[in-house]
Image (spheres, rainbow, N blue to C red):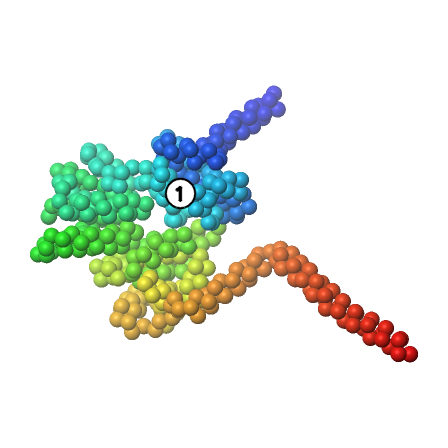
Amino acid sequence: MLLKIFFCITFYLVNISTINASRVLELSDKFSEVRRDGGLWFIMFYAPWCGHCKRLEPIWAQVAQSLYKSNVRVGRVDCTRFQNLAMEFGIQGYPTIKFIRGEVDVTYNGDRTREELVNFALRMSGPPVQEIKTETNMDLLKNSNSIFFMYVGKQSGPLWATYNSVAEQFQPHGFFYSVSDDIAAKYFDLDDLPSVFVHKESSHYFFNVVDADQSELEEAESLNITLHKWINQERFATFPKITRYNMHEFLRTEKYLVLVVVEENQINEIPPEMAEFKDMVESVIRKKRDQFHKYFQFGWIGSPDLANSIAMMAVPLPFLIVLNSSTYHHHIPEDDPSQMTPDSIHMFLESIYNQSAPIYGGNSFPVRLYRSYFEARAKLAEMWYGNPVLMVVLFGLPLGFLSLILYSTCCSDILDAEEEDYDDHEKKE
């Protein structure tokens, strides 16, 4: 009886696993024809031997589960089997994630977490600007703790046209909504209409419309540039986590990136002394947002590898480094980071803004060359400490074969020469 129950439970679990796995559709070359029929697709292009792809597989299954009841179909393509399909989409690295709508496809370049991937698919599945028509939807949106942009007022005029245009450009990176002034007035203090604001972390910040004393053409161009820049800078949280996957998006802000470097363990926990330093730096931007937010984007890094690559050295932990996103120069405080206070961080940031702080690094050819050398050396050292046997196999065997080939080539010439000399000597005798 117990054996029968065991088999029933096993069969049930296997069936559940199969059902969940089947929600990620396995696609083939026929997808080229299927996509022309319309529909929304979220596709992972992968290779079976790719380690990054294997780590993404369980997350991708969760994404498929989360989007199962939506109109977005989640699939994957084995690029080693369907190379023509990979060439059609211009796949150059694995994994590559794309959202596909008919003949248009958009590559995902953000953090590879379930939440970020699902949000990206939901943003791309709808129009660039979604309209909020009821107070219930506004309540849900405001309580969602997500960052979003909102247009308030009549859907006409230069601000509305510019907002739509910029929203279309930033659709892969943020949520954009519109609402009537009647509904918005119940949630926000509105002085001027129409207006645009960003809502994040239970606060909202308004976009300042450019002065209207210019010509109509100049005003439209200036409005587009300033709104584009403002949205690009405001689309991030006040103190987000920065990784190798989303780093390039923060570099697009053209701000100074104030990076707190700590080290997470396998369950994403930070040691108390590092967490204390991280919280202290975060308090600076929370209290001095009006002073620093325009020029500095704060954030934290949970792995020292990225900071080591920026500083081109093994940084101590915890650490503080400021990166210029325009020139790629970086700044390091002269004080020991563990001994810094909010006041000393304040002075350090002011010295950077005043361009009196020492600068390091950059993006010149010698610096890029040294950075490549440093990263390669660090990677090899990591591989050696992680698995020395594998390193011996990967590098020892090829070097051994190469040594044998060189030895046999050189020695054969020497032996042939000695043999010829010996024959000549016998003939003379």
Location of residue 379 with respect to 188 vertically, above or below = below
Between 345 and 258, which is closer to the camera in this rendering?
258
Residue at position x 47%, y 53% from top?
265
| Foreground residue among 377 and 141 | 377
Query: Measured from the top left, where is residue 22 in percent x and y?
Result: 48, 31
Q: Could you classify mark 1 by the number of other residues whose Cα lies within 10 Å: few (under 14), some (14-19), or many (20 or more)?
A: many
Residue 165, compared with residue 341, is above or below; it is above
- The residue beneath circle 1 is 98
Corner quadrant of residue 333: bottom left
- Asked if one can make out residue 233 in the rendered structure from this viewpoint, the answer is yes
**Is residue 371 toward the left or the right of residue 352 in the image?**
right
Q: Residue at x 22, y 62 (%)?
A: 291
Quadrant of the rendering where the C terminus is positioned: bottom right
Q: Quadrant of residue 365?
A: bottom left
Q: Residue furthest right?
A: 429
Q: Which residue is painted at 46% across and 44% down in the image?
A: 87
SS for tag 1?
A: strand
Residue furthest toward the top? Answer: 1
| Residue 243 location, quadrant | bottom left
Residue 295 place in picture, x, y as percent: 26, 62
Q: Toward the viewer: 71 or 14?
A: 71
Residue 188: x percent and y percent?
16, 44
**In-image side of 97 versus 345 (left or right):** right
Horizontal placement of 54 versus 39: left or right?
A: right
Residue 2 visible (yes or no): no
Q: Outermost residue, front direction?
A: 427
- What amino acid is at disc 1? Lys
* Residue in the image at 48% along x and 29% along y: 19
Judged from this view, the residue extending furthest toward the left is 213
Q: Is residue 6 above or below residue 113?
A: above
Total marks placed: 1
Q: In which quadrant will I find the N terminus?
A: top right
